[in-house]
Image (tube, rainbow, N blue to C red):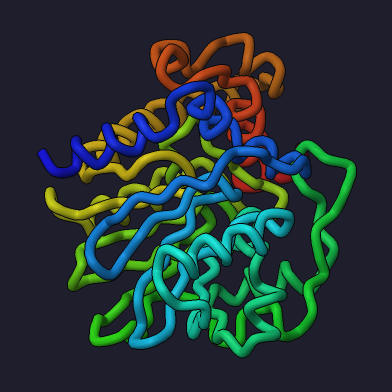
Amino acid sequence: MKHRADRRDFLQALMGGTAAAAAFGRFAIAYGRASETPIEVLKINDRIQLFSGAGGNVVAARDGDALALVDGGAPERSSELLKRISKEMGSRRVKTLFNTHWHPDQTGSNESLGKEGASIIGHENTKLWLEYANPVLGSSGTYGPLPLKARPSQTIFYGTAMSMVGNEPVEYGYLLQAHTDGDIYVFFRKSNVLVTGGVVSAAGWPIIDYETGGWIVGLVDGIKTLAGLANDDTRIIPANGAPLTRADLKAQHEMYSTISVRLQKMLRQGLGPDEAVAKAPTAEYDAKWGDPKQFVTLAFKSLWGHFAPDA
C-alpha cells in the first residue's frame, strides 16, 4: 500500500500539464533539446530522496555530512538541480556520484562535481564512452568528450562491487548490454531502494541505444536480474517516471520478452525496421506505453549485430 501511495503522490505532483512533460522529458533530453519540466521531489525515506524533471531521475542519499548521488541529470539543468538538492537535503558537498550509464541526462553533473572532488563510480564502458564525442539519438549533435575529472574514477567491468554511503552498504552491478553496454544498477540494501538506470522506464518506452551496445535481449535479461534482486517491499527507481514495484518489473519482463520474440521472428523472415513497425509487435501495450515507432525501430536494429551482423 505504501508503494501505491508513493506512485499516487508522485503522479499527483505532476498534474496540471506537467505529467505530459515528465513522460516525454527523457525524449527531449535524448534528442538534445533542453527540458523545461519543473523539478519535483519525492521523499523515499529519512535518508533518500528522488529528484525528477531535470533529465533522468536522480537519487540523493545522505552520507554523513555529505551526499551520494545516483546520476546527475542533464547538463543544462545541473546547476538548478544541485541547488535544489542542497536545499532539500541540507548539504551541498557530494562525496560520491554513481553514473548508471553514459547518456547526458545521467552524466550532466559530472563535470561540476568532478571538479569539486566527488568520486565518480560507473562501468568501464561508461568511462570509455565519455572519452569521445558520441552522437545523441535523434540529434545531429554530439556529447563529450568530458574532461578527465568528469569521467568515472572507479569502475567495474563484470559482476558487482560494494561501497559505503554513511553506514549503509551499497551494491552496484553490471547489467550486460541492455540499454547501453555500460549499464549499472545501484542497490541501497538497508533502505531496500534499487536504482535501475536506463534499463527500466516508467514513463513510456525506453530507448535502446544499440549504437553503444544496447539490445533488446540484454534489456530483457537486465530486467530479470533486477526483479531477482528485489522483493515485494523494494522501492524501485527507474530512469524516468514514478517508483515501481517488483510486480511492475515482472510485468515489464514479460512484455519485453514477448516483443523480443516477435522481433526476432520478423528479423528471420527478412523484414526491415519499417516493416517491423508496420507489423505492430507492441499493439496490446501501446495504449499504456505510447507511440512505439522509435522503440520498435531501435529494438529491431539492436538485433542486427547479434543475429544479422552483415545487415
Q: Residue 295's spot in the image, x, y percent?
A: 59, 29
Residue nearest the observer in this picture, 195 or 161 = 195
Q: Can see residue 279? A: yes
Instruction: Give the quarter of the figure containing the N terminus.
Output: top left
Residue 162 in sight in this render = no
Instruction: Give left or right: position of 28 versus 175.
Output: right
Q: Residue at x 59, y 55 (%)?
A: 180
Quadrant occupied by the C terminus: top right
Above or below residue 116? Residue 240 is above
Q: Is residue 182 above or below residue 204?
A: below
Q: Position of residue 201 (x, y in %)?
A: 45, 40
From what the image shows, is residue 55 above or below residue 283?
Answer: below
What residue lies at 69% left-to-right and 43% top-to-bottom?
A: 30
Q: In this view of the protein, which residue sits in the foreground, 267 or 77?
A: 77
Residue found farthest to the right: 140
Q: How many marks?
A: 0
**x and y percent of residue 290 in the render?**
51, 19
At a point 65% along the width and 46% down the height, the residue shown is 209
Q: Quadrant of residue 130?
A: bottom right
Quadrant in the picture for residue 278: top right
Q: Position of residue 47 (x, y in %)?
A: 28, 70
Which residue is rendered at x = 57% and y = 65% of the image? 83
